[in-house]
Image (cartoon, grey):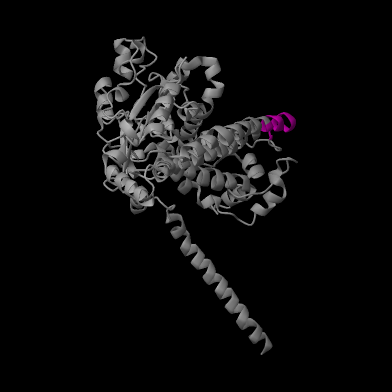
Amino acid sequence: MGRMKFLCDAERCIECNGCVTACKNEHEVPWGVNRRRVVTMNDGVPGERSISVACMHCSDAPCMAVCPTDCFYKTEDGVVLHDKDKCIGCGYCFYACPFGAPQFPNGPAAFGARGKMDKCTFCAGGPEETGSAAEYEKYGSNRLAEGKLPLCAEMCSTKALLAGDANVVADIFRERVLRRGTGAEVWGWDAAYGGGERKREREHKREGQS
Amino acid sequence: MTTHAMRAPRGGWLAALLLALMLWAAALPLQAAERPPGSTAADQAERQAERPLNNAPVWRAVRSGEEHFTTVRGPEAGVLIQSEGNTWRQLRNGPVTLYGGWLLILVPSAILLFWLIKGTMKLHGAKTGRLMKRFSGFERFVHWGTAITFLLLAVTGLAILFGKHVLLPIIGHDGLGLLLNAGKLVHNYVGPLFGIFVVLMFFAFLRDNVWRPIDAVWIRRAGGLLDGSHVPSGRFNFGEKTWFWFGVTFLGLTVAVSGLIMDFPNLGGWTRADMQTANIVHGIGAILMLALAFGHIYMGTLGAEGAYQAMKTGYVDETWAKEHHEQWYHDIKAGKSGHP
C-alpha cells in the first residue's frame, strides 16, 4: 500500500504549463476547469519561482471533513477522490481547501449553481467501474489502474513535478538537494541562470584567499 | 481659579490621550499592510544574489496567501495556499456543529418540559362568541410567507449541517446525496424569497412593535408565563416585540444577508475568506433564530389557546383579546385603530 504524493521542485519548474495542458488533454476537462495550475512568484525579476499546484491528496483532507454529503473517499493509495453523483456543488470544499483545488464547471454562478465539483484525481478515476465510459466522462482517465503515474508529472519537461509513492518521491528529491550545484549533477535555476558566473566569482575569491 | 487651573491640564491630558488613540487607530491599517521582511520582489532579488539556493522567502510567499501570477483564470487562482479555510473548518465542524446541535436539542426539550408541567395557557373567562379582527389579510400573507420559507430553509439547512451526523447512518450515502441535491436547490432558491418576506414583515409590523411604557409591566411579571396571570399589553406584548426585533429583524436580516453573499458568489467577487465568514455568521444566526422560533411556534400553537386561530383566520374572540392584549382590546372597543 503506497501513499501517493505530488512534489513540485521550485528550482526546476520553468512555468511552461505543460502539466496544465497535459492534464486538460488527458481528462478532457470541461472549459473553465483547471485541475492543475502554475503560479509564479515575483514574475520577471531575479528570484522568480514557479510552482505547479493541484489537489495535494491530503492525509487529513479538509474537503472531506466539511463535505455535507460526505461524498469524498480515500483510496488505499491515499488518493482523495469524490463521488460526483453525491456532490451538491455547495462549494464548501472550495472554502476549506488550502490549495484552491476544487473547481466548478459553472464557476461562481448565481444561486450557487456551481455544478458538480471537479478536481485532480491523481489520474485515478472515480467511483464508477474502472476503465468504464462513465468513469472517463465524469472523472477522466484512470491511469493508476493501468499502472501509470499522473500524466502531468510524466510529461514534465524538467522533471520538476514528481508524482508517486511518497517515500520514493521524497528520496528522489532528497538526492537532488544533496547533489544540487555540484559536478555533473549540476541542475536547477542557479545553474541555468547566471549561477555559473557567481560560481566563478566565488572560486576567484577562494583562490585569492589561499 | 484653582478649579480652572486644575481643569486645564486635565483637559490637555484628555486631548493628548485622544490624539494618541487617533494616531494609533490611523497606524493600524499601516501596520496591517506592512509586509514581512524579504517578501518584496526587490528583497528577493537581493537575497538571491547574497544567499543563492536559500528559498526561505519563496516559501514565505507561498504561505502568505497573496495573489501571484498565473495564466489560469479562476477565483483566487493566483493564491497558492489560503490558511483561513482551516479556521473555518475548525469553527464550523467544531463549536457551530457541537453547541448549535446541543442548543437545538435542549431548547425544544425545555419547551416540552415546560408544557408538560404548565400545560396550555387556557382562557380564564368563557368565550363570548364575538370576534375581533386581529390580523389583516396582508399581515397574514406576510406571516405565513415568512413562516413557510423559514421552515423550508430550516429543514434543508439543518440537513446540510447535521445530515452527515444524523441522517447518514439512517439513509446512507446515496440517500443523503439525493436528499441534499434537492435540499440545496430548495435552500438556494427559497433563501432570497425569505429575505424579501423578512423585509415585508419588518414594515408590516414595525408600528406595533415600538416599545411602550406598558412593556415594563410585562417584563416585571415575566409575561404571566409562570403564574398564568393577566398581563395587560398593547397589540403586541414585550415577548412578541423581542421576537420581532431580535429574532425576525436582526437575526432574519443577518441570515438573509450572509446567505445572499454565499448564494451569489458571482455578484461581488467575494473571496473564500468572505464566504467563510458569511457561512459562520449564517450558521450561528440561523441556529439562534431557530431556537427562538421554537419558542414562538410553541406560543402560537400549543402554548396559548386561541393564538393559532388568530393567525389562521385573522380573528380572535373578545375574551382572548381582553386576557392577552387588554390595552389593544380597549383601544378597539373605544373605536381606535388599535395601533399605538
Location of the N terminus of chain B by quadrant is bottom right
Above or below, B24 relative to B159: below
Look at 36% across and 39% down and name the residue there.
Answer: B265
- Residue B138 visible? The answer is no
The span picked out in magenta is B110-122
The secondary structure that dominates the magenta segment is helix
Image quadrant assignment for residue B111: top right
Please say whether residue B232 is visible from this viewpoint.
yes
Residue at 33 percent across and 33 percent down: it is A183
- Residue A18: give x, y in percent of width and height: 25, 29
Which residue is painted at 62% across and 45% down in the image? B239
Q: Quadrant for the C terminus of chain B, please.
A: bottom right
- Report the side of A162 relative to A192 (left or right): right
Q: Does B243 sit left or right of A72 as displayed?
A: right
The one of A155 and B243 positioned closer to us in this rendering:
A155
Estimate the x, y position of residue B187 in percent, counting from the top left: 43, 31
Tell whether A94 sits left or right of B247. Answer: left
Q: Quadrant of residue B61?
A: top left
Task: Check the image and report above or below for A125 versus B49.
Answer: above
Residue B275, how many percent across, how many down? 43, 40
Extreme-front residue of the structure? A210
Q: Is residue B87 left or right of residue A135?
A: right
Which residue is at the far bottom? B1
**Is residue A155 positioned above or below B256 on the image?**
above
A197 or A120: nearer the viewer: A197
Q: Nearer the viewer, residue A157 or B326?
A: A157
